[in-house]
Amino acid sequence: MGRHADPTAPRRTAPLPLLVAAGVVVLLVAGGLVWWLTGSDGGCDTRETVAVTVAPELETVTEELLADTIELDGGVCAEAEVTAQEPLQTVGDLSALEGDALPDVWLPDSSLWVARAGAAPLEPVGNFASSPVVLGTSSEAVEALGWAAAPPGWGQALAGEQPLAVPDLATSAEGLAALGAVRTALGSDEDADNAVVQAVLAAQRGPSVSAADGLAAGEAGGADAPLVPVSEHEVYATNQAAEGSSLVAVYPTEGSPSLDYPIVQVGSPSDDAAAAVDAVVRRLTSDTARTAAVDAGFRDRDGAGPTDAADFGIQQAAPAALELDPTAIQALLSRLSSLASPSRILAVFDVSTSMEAPVGDGTRATLARDAAKATLSLVPGDYAIGLWVFAYQLENGQDWAELVPTRELDADAEGRPQREVLDTQLDSIPGRLTPGGTGLYDTTLAAVRAARDNYDPTAVNSVLVVTDGTNEDDAGGITLANLMIQLAAEANPERPIKVIGVALGPDADLAALQQIADATDGAAYSAVDPADLQTVLFDALRQRG
């Protein structure tokens, strides 16, 4: 028990000179502390912020590495702001947004993304870490297949009887790398390409298993767990977060391609900004960074992995490296993409004044514009997309107006490609905001009718509605109940039109969008977090259903 002062003991008073001296010391210390906190600013006369965008799995380790201010010469300090974003989204941003909206440094999971960024001003300046691409499955499946003693080759594994969870090839570097490994293992010729295509088609014809579900099945165990092309780091991280997991990594005999986590400088900074970017890059390539990456379950540039690798389903030694040709991988992706049915989409954007609500450095309208432009840059040229806007009585008493008729993106639209025309009209959205209400239901019905009139039997036909509010129409507008009745009455099995609703922000009527989606075999998405919108739009545009 602690000792307490005796309240009955007589108090002794310190001599006056001692009290004065003590007071002076306190004032000096306090004054010095205030000067240190407010006057010195840690030696930083100028602070340069470096925007760093990283693949989601790098967020924690890079935030910790870059948490401290970096002091440079001449009173300049660099401060990093780390943002996690799927590499595909960043690729879209690089082709659609202005330079000041882009990161200064980008760390995707693979150099394959750099190859997909086209003419963007990118300069690879190093690598943060690496992680081999493996096949994730259960230890029971490995035993049943006899792979514990004799691992398979890539072709044998992916063309065998074990179910295969094919990741979304548009978003997964692991999936592309795995298919590239099969192609390389089979000779990198046209026959190899055909074998890869046949494997993908076979997997797509079988029961649909997502990569996430495949990993969950591997965790749970069982000899029927599917094979999932995945990074070694994801196996490690999944097992670290789970107790009693059966998930293990299978290393095919030819070796493994790796996610190489390049460090990419974006643009050409100058003066203090360039010095700040260089300082951040130095920290990301330092020995401290190398150790942090390995501790987080990645491998360093020499292939060294975490010391507890065997405890979490991966091997200690690095597998043999299997080099891939990025150009050949891009060609393979194009061929695989061409096998899917094209989409025909009428995109309908809310331009009511509620879209003026501030979001980050802009508004909901500018957010929707930027996300749509970035997404537009990613979809294939055989997609057909048209554009409407809606609010209240925009044109001839109608709540909607057509900005661009629906055409294929590669089609000629009065002397310009349709994609370019759409891009220009998307730029106009923030300037079209209109007061008075939101005719959501009338517009939805009109858009479904227009899409059905322009139906393409060779494509997936849909209406994409992006709104931040609820239906606010006058008494002459249709109700939600009557909209449901009309959609059911007009449905044509020979010309199905699905409605994909995107609720932007917390005030949007997601429940109504979900009812509309259910009635049309569509989908409804919520993008309450602004950072989610581009992901949601890209997923919505690729709805196959």
Image: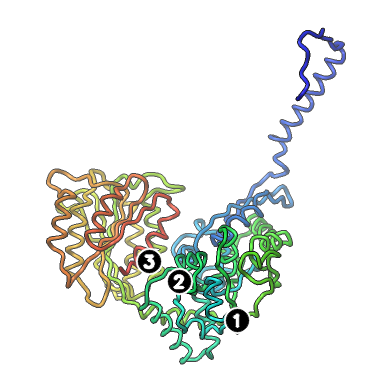
In this picture, residue 134 sits left or right of residue 404: right
Looking at marks 2 and 1 on the same chain, the residue that comes earlier in the sequence is marked by 2
| Neighbour tally class for label 2: few under 14, some 14-19, many 20 plus, Cα within 10 Å | many
Which residue is painted at 72% across and 59% down in the image?
288
Residue 44: x and y in percent read 69, 45
| Neighbour tally class for label 3: few under 14, some 14-19, many 20 plus, Cα within 10 Å | many
* Circle on res. 8: none
In this picture, residue 484 sits left or right of residue 419: left
- Occupied quadrant, residue 341: bottom left
Which residue is labeled 1 in the image? 323
Marks 3, 1: nearer the viewer = 1
Amino acid carrying mark 2 in the image: Pro
Amino acid carrying mark 3 in the image: Leu
* Circle on res. 376: 3
- Element carrying mark 1: loop
**Cα–Cα span, label 2 and label 3:** 22 Å
